[in-house]
Image (cartoon, rainbow, N blue to C red):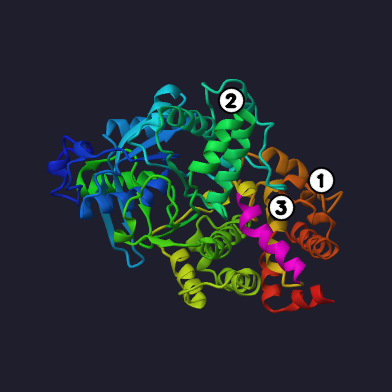
Amino acid sequence: MENPLTLTQENLSIISDRIPCPKYDRAKLSMGLVHIGVGGFHRAHQAYYTHQLIEKFNGSDWGICGVGLRKADQKIHDVLQKQNGLYTLIVKHPDGTIAPQVMGSIIDFQLAVNSPSSVILRLASEETKIVSLTITEGGYNFKPSSGEFDFANPDIQHELEHPDDPKTVYGFLTASLKKRRDAGLRAFTVLSCDNIQHNGDMAREMLLAFAQAQDRELAKWIEEEVCFPNSMVDRITPVTTQADIDYLENTYQIKDEWPVTCEPFIQWVIEDKFSNGRPEFEKVGVQFVPDVKPYEKMKLRLLNAGHSVLGILGAIHGYPTINACIEDHTFRTFLRAFMDREATPTLDELQGIDLAAYKDSLQERFANPNIKDSVSRICSESSAKLPKFLIETLNENLSSNGSIQFAALVIAAWCYYSDKGVDRNGDALEIIDVMEGELHQAAVQTKEDPLSFIKLKSIFGDLSGNQRFAQVYTFLIQTIYREGGVINLMQNMLNSGFENRDKN
């Protein structure tokens, strides 16, 4: 076997004989887009759409400069610098087809912790028209229970005192917008691509809260000049494994230190509201709409919540991947019952969407045997996800006297997961959550106080004070602790036995 070729611009002409590669001249691209938070999802989604636009429609003004805000971004920074921003996107189809393709839309990457001033200058450059974000739910720095900006964050306190030494996304955005204002330049658009309902509105509210505390005149300018379109994004993108890296090397003799894998499905719906021009993404399948909120609510409450339903319950049951969960008849039926009975009644009117077909497609996507999305990835940072994905739906159903049993079981299972840290077989769970310690401390008191976990107000608000929910949850948590699992409860719910108990 010949020696593998490192994925670099220099080797691209040879690699292009093996798999599809960019045909455009990357040296001639302008960096109209700056993206903060370059992870697997960004590279499978926004950077993919941008690559398609440049390749097919000469979108040369929209090359991407990636930015990492955290020390943890050092690895992706180093890999992309070594590979000239190039990486392989490996699309895995349900029928077993695997389609790798080299993406070329990322043409620079800057690490903010190493050089904050250079990142500020890039954001402030006239060339930059859009700053997009995938910083996870936790990166928005709001209190889950109230939605208010968290000024207690030490990095935020530092930035308010030292505006020229930013640490968070808010410090970098305000520092660069101030430079643009002072130079007489138009503001850039802030485009959130995170799984937060009304993500653009959230980005706007949080940035203005920070800016008002730092510089009221600047805050007023931001309020008047910066657009924050809401958007809905969708593409399942599991964590890259060593097997993915080895696949490229063994099959194509290409050495890519950090490829990305994804499913074939992709969707992006954006509110058409921009400060300073935008790419013609509609040419490559992006939907621009006047109001994205009904679509994002649909996705958050069906796909994202559905993932968490399978993830939390599957973790306790001992399933390693989402497709393993959906292959189990009880899990698959439970998921559909949750979507039909609890999520769907809370959705708004959706133009042009067949909800039954959409839910069918979700089950098919979750079952893709080639994706093997890990349960631990889906469960990661549940403290940031579940308040938006699941608890808002639960609260609406409590207000309307709708079904709550399926969501309540997931929360009870999350308590057990946070307390025990093992599945039903006694194998340790990989728990990744910034609030892991607080969740464990609240959960570990469950035997003395069945409601201890849901008394964590930063996550659950006043949920423990709702008598109906407290009764349902208490029964569920006591049963899970007694049985050490959830499968019997799931089956009982599907047989309507528990629903009758709740109504009584």
The vertical placement of 367 against 138, above or below, is below
Is residue 240 visible in the rendered image? The answer is: no
Look at the image and give the residue range highlighted in magenta.
Answer: 385-400
Secondary structure found at label 2:
helix
Location of residue 311 in the rendering, given as x and y in whole percent from the top left corner: 57, 57
Is residue 28 visible in the rendered image? The answer is: yes
Write down the residue under mark 3. Answer: 416
Secondary structure found at label 3:
helix
Left or right? Give the position of 298 relative to 5. Answer: right
Disc 1 residue crowd, few under 14, some 14–19, many 20+, Cα 10 Å? some
Secondary structure found at label 1:
loop
Whether label 3 touches label 1, CB < 8 Å: no
Residue at 54% across / 61% down in the picture?
A: 293
| Residue 117: mark | none
The vertical placement of 73 against 411, above or below, is above
- Quarter holding residue 465: bottom right
Between 492 and 271, the one lying in front of the other is 271
Amino acid carrying mark 3 in the image = Tyr
Q: Nearer the viewer, mark 3 or mark 2?
A: 2
Is 247 magenta? The answer is no
Write down the residue under mark 1. Answer: 445
Between 255 and 122, the one lying in front of the other is 122
Write down the residue under mark 2. Answer: 159
